[in-house]
Amino acid sequence: MTATARGVDAPGRAGIDARTLRTDRWWLPPAATTVGLLAFVVYGGVRAFQQQYFFADERYLTPFYSPCVSLGCAAEPGAAHFGMFLPDHPLIPYAALSLPFLLLFRLTCYYYRKAYYRSFWLSPAACAVPEPHAQYTGETRFPLIMQNAHRYFFYLAAVIALINTYDALLAFRHPTDGFVVGVGNLVLLVNVALLWGYTLSCHSCRHVMGGRLTHFSKHPVRYRLWTWVSRLNTRHMFFAWITLGTLVATDLYVMLVARGTITDLRIVG
Protein backbone atom coordinates (compact mmCIF):
# COMPACT_ATOMS: atom_id res chain seq x y z
CA MET A 1 0.00 0.00 0.00
CA THR A 2 1.40 3.38 -0.94
CA ALA A 3 1.72 6.30 1.44
CA THR A 4 -1.39 7.96 -0.03
CA ALA A 5 -3.52 4.81 -0.20
CA ARG A 6 -4.95 4.74 3.29
CA GLY A 7 -8.26 5.09 5.08
CA VAL A 8 -11.07 5.88 2.65
CA ASP A 9 -8.48 6.03 -0.18
CA ALA A 10 -7.32 2.45 0.36
CA PRO A 11 -7.66 -0.14 -2.44
CA GLY A 12 -11.12 -1.66 -2.64
CA ARG A 13 -12.86 1.53 -1.62
CA ALA A 14 -15.22 3.43 -3.89
CA GLY A 15 -13.49 5.94 -6.15
CA ILE A 16 -14.75 9.12 -4.47
CA ASP A 17 -12.82 12.37 -4.82
CA ALA A 18 -14.40 14.09 -1.79
CA ARG A 19 -12.42 13.95 1.43
CA THR A 20 -15.49 12.56 3.18
CA LEU A 21 -19.20 12.12 2.47
CA ARG A 22 -20.15 12.96 6.02
CA THR A 23 -22.62 15.84 6.10
CA ASP A 24 -22.81 16.24 9.89
CA ARG A 25 -20.55 18.53 11.89
CA TRP A 26 -17.94 15.82 12.48
CA TRP A 27 -15.29 18.48 13.20
CA LEU A 28 -17.16 19.83 16.22
CA PRO A 29 -16.04 17.23 18.85
CA PRO A 30 -12.30 17.45 18.01
CA ALA A 31 -12.55 21.25 17.89
CA ALA A 32 -14.26 21.39 21.28
CA THR A 33 -11.62 19.04 22.71
CA THR A 34 -8.86 21.27 21.39
CA VAL A 35 -10.40 24.37 22.95
CA GLY A 36 -11.03 22.62 26.27
CA LEU A 37 -7.53 21.18 26.63
CA LEU A 38 -5.82 24.38 25.51
CA ALA A 39 -7.88 26.44 27.96
CA PHE A 40 -6.80 24.22 30.86
CA VAL A 41 -3.13 24.20 29.80
CA VAL A 42 -3.03 28.00 29.48
CA TYR A 43 -4.80 28.58 32.79
CA GLY A 44 -2.73 25.97 34.63
CA GLY A 45 0.51 27.30 33.16
CA VAL A 46 -0.23 30.88 34.15
CA ARG A 47 -1.24 29.92 37.70
CA ALA A 48 1.69 27.55 38.24
CA PHE A 49 4.17 30.34 37.51
CA GLN A 50 2.23 33.19 39.12
CA GLN A 51 3.64 32.24 42.53
CA GLN A 52 1.06 34.14 44.57
CA TYR A 53 -2.50 33.78 45.85
CA PHE A 54 -2.05 30.04 46.45
CA PHE A 55 -2.83 29.87 50.18
CA ALA A 56 -5.96 31.30 51.78
CA ASP A 57 -7.38 31.68 55.30
CA GLU A 58 -4.19 30.15 56.68
CA ARG A 59 -5.39 26.65 55.68
CA TYR A 60 -6.55 26.39 52.05
CA LEU A 61 -3.79 25.29 49.66
CA THR A 62 -4.62 25.18 45.96
CA PRO A 63 -3.83 21.85 44.25
CA PHE A 64 -1.74 23.70 41.65
CA TYR A 65 0.81 24.41 44.41
CA SER A 66 0.69 21.13 46.31
CA PRO A 67 3.05 20.14 47.75
CA CYS A 68 4.51 23.63 48.19
CA VAL A 69 8.21 22.82 48.59
CA SER A 70 9.90 25.92 47.17
CA LEU A 71 11.82 28.35 49.34
CA GLY A 72 9.35 30.91 48.03
CA CYS A 73 6.65 29.19 50.08
CA ALA A 74 8.15 31.00 53.07
CA ALA A 75 5.76 33.83 52.16
CA GLU A 76 2.99 31.47 53.31
CA PRO A 77 4.73 29.15 55.81
CA GLY A 78 1.50 27.32 56.61
CA ALA A 79 1.39 26.05 53.02
CA ALA A 80 4.70 24.18 53.28
CA HIS A 81 3.43 20.95 54.81
CA PHE A 82 6.49 18.98 53.72
CA GLY A 83 9.28 21.50 54.12
CA MET A 84 10.93 23.91 51.67
CA PHE A 85 13.97 22.75 49.71
CA LEU A 86 13.56 23.74 46.03
CA PRO A 87 15.17 27.02 44.90
CA ASP A 88 12.91 30.02 44.56
CA HIS A 89 13.05 31.06 40.90
CA PRO A 90 10.42 32.60 38.55
CA LEU A 91 10.83 29.68 36.14
CA ILE A 92 10.45 26.98 38.80
CA PRO A 93 6.88 26.33 40.02
CA TYR A 94 6.48 26.09 43.77
CA ALA A 95 5.05 22.58 43.23
CA ALA A 96 7.76 21.52 40.77
CA LEU A 97 8.06 18.21 42.63
CA SER A 98 4.58 17.07 41.59
CA LEU A 99 3.42 19.01 38.52
CA PRO A 100 5.68 17.23 35.96
CA PHE A 101 4.42 13.80 37.08
CA LEU A 102 0.79 14.89 37.09
CA LEU A 103 1.25 16.29 33.59
CA LEU A 104 2.87 13.06 32.40
CA PHE A 105 0.13 10.99 34.04
CA ARG A 106 -2.56 12.86 32.13
CA LEU A 107 -0.52 13.15 28.95
CA THR A 108 -0.07 9.36 28.79
CA CYS A 109 -3.62 8.58 29.99
CA TYR A 110 -5.49 6.27 27.61
CA TYR A 111 -8.44 8.63 27.32
CA TYR A 112 -6.35 11.76 26.83
CA ARG A 113 -4.30 9.99 24.17
CA LYS A 114 -7.46 9.42 22.19
CA ALA A 115 -8.56 13.00 22.82
CA TYR A 116 -5.44 14.79 21.65
CA TYR A 117 -4.58 12.28 18.92
CA ARG A 118 -7.92 13.06 17.31
CA SER A 119 -8.10 16.77 18.06
CA PHE A 120 -4.53 18.03 17.67
CA TRP A 121 -3.02 15.43 15.34
CA LEU A 122 -6.21 14.46 13.47
CA SER A 123 -5.19 10.83 13.74
CA PRO A 124 -7.96 10.29 12.79
CA ALA A 125 -10.18 13.33 13.32
CA ALA A 126 -13.36 11.26 13.09
CA CYS A 127 -14.77 8.06 11.64
CA ALA A 128 -14.82 7.99 7.82
CA VAL A 129 -12.56 11.06 7.70
CA PRO A 130 -9.05 10.22 6.40
CA GLU A 131 -6.13 11.49 8.43
CA PRO A 132 -3.59 13.79 6.76
CA HIS A 133 -0.54 11.77 7.82
CA ALA A 134 1.35 9.77 5.21
CA GLN A 135 2.87 7.36 7.73
CA TYR A 136 1.87 5.83 11.01
CA THR A 137 4.30 4.11 13.36
CA GLY A 138 2.04 3.93 16.41
CA GLU A 139 3.64 4.16 19.83
CA THR A 140 6.79 2.26 18.86
CA ARG A 141 9.17 5.19 18.44
CA PHE A 142 10.29 8.20 20.44
CA PRO A 143 8.52 10.23 21.75
CA LEU A 144 5.28 8.23 21.66
CA ILE A 145 6.99 5.13 23.01
CA MET A 146 6.98 7.01 26.33
CA GLN A 147 3.23 6.37 26.48
CA ASN A 148 4.11 2.89 27.70
CA ALA A 149 5.37 4.40 30.97
CA HIS A 150 1.83 5.38 31.94
CA ARG A 151 1.59 2.71 34.66
CA TYR A 152 4.58 4.21 36.48
CA PHE A 153 3.12 7.70 36.34
CA PHE A 154 -0.04 6.19 37.81
CA TYR A 155 1.85 5.16 40.95
CA LEU A 156 3.25 8.68 41.34
CA ALA A 157 -0.16 10.25 40.68
CA ALA A 158 -1.65 8.07 43.44
CA VAL A 159 0.96 9.42 45.87
CA ILE A 160 0.13 12.99 44.87
CA ALA A 161 -3.58 12.25 45.31
CA LEU A 162 -2.75 11.18 48.86
CA ILE A 163 -0.96 14.50 49.39
CA ASN A 164 -4.00 16.39 48.07
CA THR A 165 -6.17 14.39 50.46
CA TYR A 166 -3.85 15.33 53.33
CA ASP A 167 -4.13 19.01 52.31
CA ALA A 168 -7.93 18.80 52.26
CA LEU A 169 -8.11 17.17 55.69
CA LEU A 170 -5.55 19.54 57.20
CA ALA A 171 -7.64 22.48 56.00
CA PHE A 172 -10.26 21.66 58.64
CA ARG A 173 -7.90 22.99 61.31
CA HIS A 174 -7.36 26.73 61.59
CA PRO A 175 -4.15 27.81 63.40
CA THR A 176 -6.08 29.99 65.87
CA ASP A 177 -9.74 28.95 65.61
CA GLY A 178 -9.22 25.19 65.80
CA PHE A 179 -11.66 22.91 63.98
CA VAL A 180 -13.65 24.84 61.38
CA VAL A 181 -15.68 24.03 58.30
CA GLY A 182 -16.02 26.53 55.51
CA VAL A 183 -17.16 26.51 51.91
CA GLY A 184 -13.52 26.13 50.95
CA ASN A 185 -13.38 22.81 52.81
CA LEU A 186 -16.26 21.49 50.73
CA VAL A 187 -14.59 22.72 47.53
CA LEU A 188 -11.33 20.94 48.43
CA LEU A 189 -13.15 17.73 49.41
CA VAL A 190 -15.20 17.56 46.21
CA ASN A 191 -12.08 18.16 44.14
CA VAL A 192 -10.02 15.48 45.90
CA ALA A 193 -12.90 12.96 45.72
CA LEU A 194 -13.16 13.43 41.96
CA LEU A 195 -9.37 13.27 41.61
CA TRP A 196 -9.49 9.87 43.30
CA GLY A 197 -12.26 8.89 40.89
CA TYR A 198 -10.03 9.80 37.95
CA THR A 199 -6.95 8.11 39.43
CA LEU A 200 -8.68 4.88 40.45
CA SER A 201 -10.66 4.60 37.20
CA CYS A 202 -7.35 4.56 35.31
CA HIS A 203 -6.72 1.56 33.05
CA SER A 204 -3.40 0.96 34.81
CA CYS A 205 -5.19 0.77 38.16
CA ARG A 206 -7.53 -1.84 36.70
CA HIS A 207 -4.52 -3.85 35.57
CA VAL A 208 -2.90 -3.56 39.01
CA MET A 209 -6.05 -4.95 40.60
CA GLY A 210 -6.65 -7.89 38.28
CA GLY A 211 -3.87 -8.14 35.75
CA ARG A 212 -1.77 -11.30 35.38
CA LEU A 213 -4.30 -13.38 37.33
CA THR A 214 -5.11 -16.77 35.82
CA HIS A 215 -7.90 -17.67 38.24
CA PHE A 216 -10.03 -14.98 39.82
CA SER A 217 -11.57 -17.61 42.09
CA LYS A 218 -8.23 -17.98 43.88
CA HIS A 219 -7.98 -14.24 44.52
CA PRO A 220 -11.43 -13.10 45.75
CA VAL A 221 -10.18 -9.82 47.22
CA ARG A 222 -8.39 -8.74 44.06
CA TYR A 223 -11.39 -9.87 42.02
CA ARG A 224 -13.70 -7.63 44.05
CA LEU A 225 -11.29 -4.73 43.65
CA TRP A 226 -10.99 -5.43 39.92
CA THR A 227 -14.78 -5.43 39.43
CA TRP A 228 -15.10 -2.18 41.41
CA VAL A 229 -12.34 -0.47 39.42
CA SER A 230 -13.82 -1.85 36.19
CA ARG A 231 -17.12 -0.11 36.94
CA LEU A 232 -15.22 3.11 37.63
CA ASN A 233 -13.24 2.61 34.43
CA THR A 234 -16.40 2.98 32.32
CA ARG A 235 -16.58 6.58 33.62
CA HIS A 236 -12.92 7.39 33.08
CA MET A 237 -13.69 9.95 30.38
CA PHE A 238 -16.16 11.69 32.69
CA PHE A 239 -13.59 11.90 35.49
CA ALA A 240 -10.90 13.05 33.04
CA TRP A 241 -12.97 16.09 32.05
CA ILE A 242 -14.70 16.88 35.33
CA THR A 243 -11.41 16.97 37.22
CA LEU A 244 -10.05 19.57 34.82
CA GLY A 245 -13.05 21.70 35.78
CA THR A 246 -12.81 21.07 39.52
CA LEU A 247 -9.07 21.77 39.55
CA VAL A 248 -9.68 25.16 37.95
CA ALA A 249 -12.69 25.87 40.19
CA THR A 250 -10.74 24.94 43.35
CA ASP A 251 -7.77 27.06 42.35
CA LEU A 252 -10.01 29.99 41.47
CA TYR A 253 -11.76 29.78 44.83
CA VAL A 254 -8.50 29.72 46.79
CA MET A 255 -7.08 32.56 44.67
CA LEU A 256 -10.16 34.77 45.14
CA VAL A 257 -10.18 34.19 48.90
CA ALA A 258 -6.43 34.84 49.10
CA ARG A 259 -6.81 38.09 47.17
CA GLY A 260 -9.67 39.21 49.39
CA THR A 261 -12.07 39.31 46.44
CA ILE A 262 -14.49 37.02 48.26
CA THR A 263 -14.78 35.85 51.87
CA ASP A 264 -14.88 32.19 52.81
CA LEU A 265 -18.23 31.43 54.42
CA ARG A 266 -17.83 29.58 57.73
CA ILE A 267 -20.32 26.78 58.33
CA VAL A 268 -18.79 25.52 61.58
CA GLY A 269 -16.42 27.44 63.84
Image: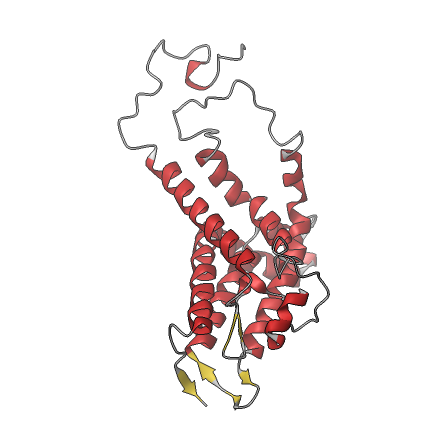
In depth, the one of 53 and 25 nearer the eye is 53
In the picture, measured across the screen, residue 264 lies left or right of residue 54, that is: left
Residue 201 position by quadrant: bottom right
Looking at the image, residue 66 lies above or below residue 12: below
Q: Residue furthest right?
A: 85
Question: Percent position (x, y) of residue 232?
Answer: 50, 57
Question: Percent position (x, y) of residue 267?
Answer: 40, 85
In depth, the one of 84 and 143 nearer the eye is 84
Q: How is the image coloured?
A: secondary structure
Is residue 260 at least partly visible in the picture? yes
Looking at the image, residue 170 lies above or below residue 216: below
Looking at the image, residue 90 lies above or below residue 116: below
Looking at the image, residue 22 lies above or below residue 72: above
Is residue 210 at least partly visible in the picture? no
In depth, the one of 173 and 155 nearer the eye is 173
Question: Percent position (x, y) of residue 116?
Answer: 49, 38
- Count of numbered badges drawn on the protein: 0
Q: What's the residue at 42%, 40% (across, down)?
A: 34
In the picture, measured across the screen, residue 174 lies left or right of residue 260, that is: right
Q: Quadrant for the N terminus, please.
A: top right
Question: Percent position (x, y) of residue 253?
Answer: 43, 68
Q: What's the residue at 39%, 37% (across, down)?
A: 30
Q: Residue furthest left?
A: 23
